[in-house]
Image (cartoon, rainbow, N blue to C red):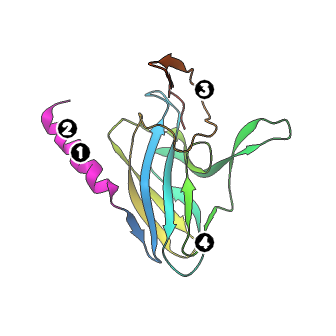
Amino acid sequence: MSPMKTILAATTAALLAFPAFAEGDITIEDAYARASGMNAMAGAAFFQIMNHGDQDDRLIAAKSDVAKRVELHTHKETAEGVMQMMEVEEGFPIAAGGMHALQRGGDHVMFMGLNQPFEDGSTISVTLVFEKAGEMTVEIPVDLKRNPMGGGMQHGKMGQGKMKGGQMEQDNTSTN
């Protein structure tokens, strides 16, 4: 990467590190998106939703031009003990004064039928729809190298671990 591109990427990342605000005291923090590769048909976004207000709210939808379908998803264990990804039509509640984490292996925004590849260092525009706070558009950086926060099940291709220097090294090629 050229020095100018490095500076531009660093500046963009710094600007995106500031929380995004919606009407009603909702902020989005630590957002990032990823897909499993250049030919991936699906991707996901993760972030923390902070509710600094005194009323409960709910994330009820997400919209973006980067995919044919955008849904709120989670992982649930089936009766057979298998983790399955599924849409959460009722959305995600965010308690007054609370936080709701969208993270790998748990709740997340799912992009299906990608219209463009998720390129590391680029950004995607996503409009989040809240029950009370309304619509909020956020620019989410694509980070294909980021490790999962808090672990959890990953969907997509499961990586194979390798020992290196006494530590487990993961092949993080899954979507989330």
Mark 2 or mark 4: whose residue is earlier in sequence: 2
Mark 2 or mark 3: whose residue is earlier in sequence: 2
Residue 10 is tagged as 1
Q: Which residue is mark 3?
A: 158
Image: magenta residue range = 1-18
Asked if residue 7 lies left or right of residue 68, the reply is: left
Q: CA distance from mark 2 to mark 3?
A: 31 Å
Q: Residue at x 61, y 42 (%)?
A: 105
Q: Which residue is mark 2?
A: 6
Q: Secondary structure at mark 1?
A: helix
Q: Residues within 10 Å of mark 2 (few under 14, many from 20)?
A: few
Please identify the quarter of the rendering in which residue 54 is found.
bottom right
5 magenta-colored = yes
Relative to 144, does residue 72 appear above or below in the rendering? below
Q: CA distance from mark 2 to mark 4?
A: 39 Å
Q: Farthest residue toward the right?
A: 79
Mark 1 or mark 3: whose residue is earlier in sequence: 1
Residue 95 is tagged as 4
Instruction: Give the residue type that dot 1 points to.
Output: Ala
